Amino acid sequence: MSLRTQLWIAVALIMLLSALVSITVSTLSAQRYLAQQLHLKNVDNATALALSLTQLPKEDARIELAIAAQFDTGHYRLIRLTDPRGEVIQERSSPVAPEGVPRWFLRLMAFEVDPGVAHISDGWSQFGRLQVESQTSYAYESLWQGSRWLALIFAGGAVLIGVIGSLFLNRCVRPLQDVVRQAEAVGQRRFITIVEPNTLEFRAVANAMNRLSRHVKNMLHEEANRLRQLQARLHHDAVTGLLNREQVMAQFRVVLGADNEGATGTLTLLRIQRLPDLNRELGRERLDALLGRLGGSLRALAQENEFGLAGRLNGSDLVVIASGVNDVSGVAKTLIGRIPDTLGEDTSGLIRIDVGVTTYLPGEEPGAVLARADSALARAELGPGFRAEIEPSETPWGHRTQAQWREAIREGLQNLGLQLAGFPVVDGSGILIHTEAPMRLFMDGELRSAAYFMPWAVRLKLIRELDDAVLKRAFERLAQPGHPLAVNLSTDSLLDTEFRQGLYRSLNERPAAAPRLWLEFPARGALANLAELREVCRSVAYTGCKVGIEHAGAEAFNLQAMNDLGLHYVKIDGAIVEGIHRSTETQGLVRGLCTVAHSIGVLIIAENCHDPADFAVLADLGVDGMTGHAVGAGRD
């Protein structure tokens, strides 16, 4: 029972007792007063009538007429005249029942009124004894009406007091509601603080809760920072801030996976010529600062793409991978334009950087792509100044122009239809958590993965149509009994207000299917648009639908950003967990990520778990779910 309910029950009981006591006291007082007045009336009327009869001749007719006249002109229940022996000489009575008065009230408020008694003389001798009783029905009716009015006044007062009390109670209890909301948030592993109220007792509770929330939040924030620093040390080059060779190649292998949506794009290889000579000419500190600026510029360029990567392969070779970007000429021009600005006028004449650009396609080997880029780079080294050469992919695209791509994608949607593949996601015991269902589209006579058409769909603004089709197919599958289904949605759809409204309507219209639907967005794009992601998480939460992000690294576990989002799960990038059974430092990183995620109520799922040895280690580290070849993949 809530405190508000208990307070209202206490107030209602007090008011009810007060009303009962007041009505009872008032009614009894009125009853006593009326009884006294009736008794005085009886005595006065008996005395007056006895005096009048004493003066009359003692004839039966005259006495009867006088008593009848007195009875008819007043409100009497009984007038009786008896002789000295007690025999009745004359009697008039008219017992009248009170109108509209309940019997229980008559029993409780019964009057005990003594009759008025007077003696009548006939000369020096006693003629008789006169007894007068006034009518009590009017007194009962008056007492009942007074009690009713008093009860109505109390009821009206109670309503008025209730209204005023509600306003006052709401004001008093509002700080407690904030404390309850904060306690619920802590229970949901969201550590928020509230404004401390003026009420001393509530202020003490709120202050203690705020201290607890800040302490836990700071502790988790420090842990998240430590993990980011650990990931930076493990995966990044200390001078440029770019990914190191092992990590960039691991991520590139994930990008080239046939089921990855960003598996088409360009790879750019940059080579800094005469690096040892530059170290002597510029000095180590100056050269490191220059390499840091160059790394920052390349990292910014990579982050313009949702699945972009930038890394340092060795001392002089840098690489930029742009998924979904196939305009190699545009990439080359962009780099050639940015490099001089990044180096600065004082050093651009001393440093030469050559550029080789190539495209890659799903399923290619990383070595083959790098070999093409290196071939282009070799040609660039033969010419003067900043140069960029292009080595196209050996595998031709199915379509060449934007119009052809648009027609092919729309034909696949309208005529052949979009399908969902099925890849199981299981926990450490092998129990299915959900089935991940990336989209597949019939194009060019075969079923194509998203890697084939997704970059063009984004460029041609067709991603909304694809995501609508994905949701339609997902709800069709969820209409049948089965396991939960996870579908991938794009950042463009996350930012589309109309798409979000349609999603909410679809979930509300399908209350049975909504709890089995898992929605996931790319981590980089989703975390760059926290307001929209937060809206989606909170709007679908009451339907039971779960929301998560995919391809996430340690940077996604920024507690300041994730604390109040309401995410249900995070899928860690497969490049982080690849070969984890061989690296104790990576195991420490993943264990820490699990600790931070679990502390805020978020499930951790590892992507692209291809090695059974990795599967066993991940389960021991606290990862909630895994997907990949080690789990088993295939169509549903």
Image (cartoon, grey):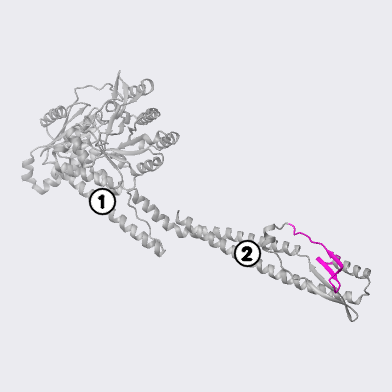
**Residue toward you, 285 or 539:** 539
Crowding at mark 1 (Cα within 10 Å: few <14, some 14-19, many 20+): some
Residue 569, percent across and down? Answer: 30, 40
Tag 2 residue: 23
The answer to whether residue 75 is seen in the rendering is no
Question: Residue shown at 21%/22% (left/top)?
Answer: 395
Label 2 crowd bin: few (<14), some (14–19), many (20+), radius 10 Å:
some
Give 185 or 229, whichever is nearer the viewer: 185
Marks 2 and 1 sit apart, C-alpha to C-alpha, by 64 Å
Quarter of the image for residue 489 reads top left
Residue 192: % across, % down: 34, 53
Mark on residue 221? 1
Q: Is-magenta flag for residue 540? A: no
The answer to whether 142 is drawn above or below residue 620 in the figure is below
Q: Quadrant of the C terminus?
A: top left
**Picture layout, residue 599 above or below residue 517:** below
Q: Position of residue 355 (x, y in %)?
A: 15, 33
| Disc 2 and disc 1 in contact, CB within 8 angstroms | no
Q: Residue at x 54, y 59 (%)?
A: 12
Q: Residue 84: within the magenta?
A: yes
Q: Residue lying farthest front?
A: 85
Label 2 residue SS: helix
